[in-house]
Amino acid sequence: MDVILIAAVTANGMIARHRHEVVDWSLDLALFKKQTMGFPVILGSNTFDTLAVDLKGREIIVVHRNDDPAEVINRLKAERCFIIGGSHTYGRFAPFLTQIYITFHPLVFADGIPLFTGLQNELYLQFIAKIPVIKSAGIYQFQFKIIKP
Ligand SMILES: NC(=O)c1ccc[n+]([C@@H]2O[C@H](COP(=O)([O-])OP(=O)(O)OC[C@H]3O[C@@H](n4cnc5c(N)ncnc54)[C@H](OP(=O)(O)O)[C@@H]3O)[C@@H](O)[C@H]2O)c1
């Protein structure tokens, strides 16, 4: 099964200004909806509490610290699922990722929440594709495959 991290990030690799921020600066929500529709989405409890997007049409799996990421994924029957954040959840599910979809936004936060919290090992990425979000603003989603080192 494909396990795909999807995130909006700033130019300095942040996904939010703070843990309770409602991310209203993301410009790729239409693409997010199109790509995730019909597939399970896995998110952490903070992200669930700060959710700015409508997740109708998708199985929503909210994970807590006691959940085992491997078990959560193994229970799913779908051909793909999406890890939609936040930072702790990206970190905990990192060993199981097969792809990463990142949309870089023209922002730099002074303080913020990094893409990954608690990442245990480095990840190695191979470029797959670049999907236009807002071409005139230079906003693209970059898709990478996770490769084994
Ligand atoms: N830009 C983007 O694309 C994007 C996407 C998603 C989210 N976000 C932002 O990311 C932020 C939330 O990120 P987050 O990392 O705080 O939350 P999160 O990953 O959504 O939720 C926290 C998760 O980590 C667990 N946890 C908390 N403390 C832990 C610990 N000490 N050890 C192990 N697990 C622990 C929580 O379990 P419990 O439930 O048991 O506490 C929960 O499962 C929000 O601001 C949100 O808006 C941005």
Image: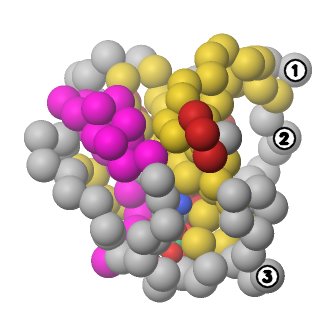
Label ID, residue 122: 2
Q: What secondary structure is marked by label 3?
A: loop
Residue at x-position 28% and y-position 60%: 53
Give percent across and percent down for residue 81: 36, 32
In magenta segment, residue 102: no
Give percent across and percent down for residue 118: 72, 62
Left-right relation of 101 to 51: right
Q: Are marks 1 and 2 in contact (CB under 8 Å)?
A: yes
* Amino acid identity at mark 1: Pro
In magenta segment, residue 39: yes
Give percent across and percent down for residue 56: 13, 49
- Range of residues picked out in magenta: 28-49
Foreground of the two, 32 or 139: 139
Q: What secondary structure is marked by label 2?
A: loop
Find residue 128 and report its image quarter: top right
Foreground of the two, 33 or 87: 33
| Residue where numbered disc 3 is placed | 110
Residue at x-position 36% and y-position 23%: 80
Label ID, residue 39: none
